[in-house]
Image (spheres, rainbow, N blue to C red):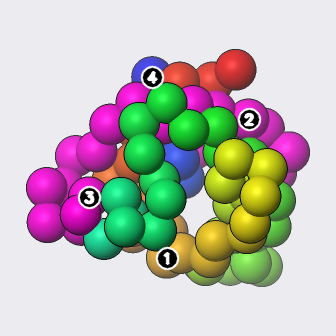
Amino acid sequence: MVNLADLKIGEKGEIVGFTDESLSLKLLEMGCLPGTEVVLTHLAPFGDPIAIRVSGSYTLSMRREEAETMLIKRI
């Protein structure tokens, strides 16, 4: 298991959980539910922010700091 920030562009993963309880509520409201497939699609030149494709339906941008709190299982 890794965090979302560890993925490389084009890699897929499945959300397993979160390490920050207060931030997890915000991410859950944005559709980042456990079991959801995500793909890292864009990475800014200095690594922050990143963009992910959630469930193949929409793109979500977030800070690297937020991505580090999301636990992912590579698929």
Q: Amino acid at mark 3?
A: Ser
First-in-chain label (2 vs 3)? 2
Q: CA distance from mark 2 to mark 3?
A: 20 Å
Q: Position of residue 15 (x, y in %)?
A: 48, 36
Residue 20 painted magenta: yes
Q: Residues within 10 Å of mark 4 (few under 14, many from 20)?
A: few
Q: Is residue 55 left or right of residue 66?
A: right
Q: Give residue 72's mark.
A: none
Q: Give residue 24's mark.
A: 3
Nearer the camera: disc 3 or disc 1: 3
Kindly state the secondary structure of the residue where label 1 is placed. loop
Q: Looking at the image, do the residues carrying marks 4 and 1 touch, with CB atoms under 8 Å apart? A: no
Q: Amino acid at mark 1?
A: Arg
First-in-chain label (1 vs 2)? 2
Q: Foreground: 63 or 29? A: 29
Kindly state the secondary structure of the residue where label 2 is placed. strand
Q: Give residue 12's mark.
A: 2
Q: Is residue 31 left or right of residue 48?
A: left
* Above or below, comparing residue 3 to residue 29 in the picture: above
Q: Foreground: 45 or 70? A: 70
* Above or below, comparing residue 12 to residue 53 in the picture: above
Q: Residue at x 74, y 66 (%)?
A: 58
Q: Looking at the image, do the residues carrying marks 2 and 3 touch, with CB atoms under 8 Å apart? A: no
Q: Amino acid at mark 2?
A: Lys
First-in-chain label (4 vs 1)? 4
Q: Looking at the image, do the residues carrying marks 2 and 4 touch, with CB atoms under 8 Å apart? A: no
Residue corresponding to mark 1: 63
Nearer the camera: disc 1 or disc 2: 2
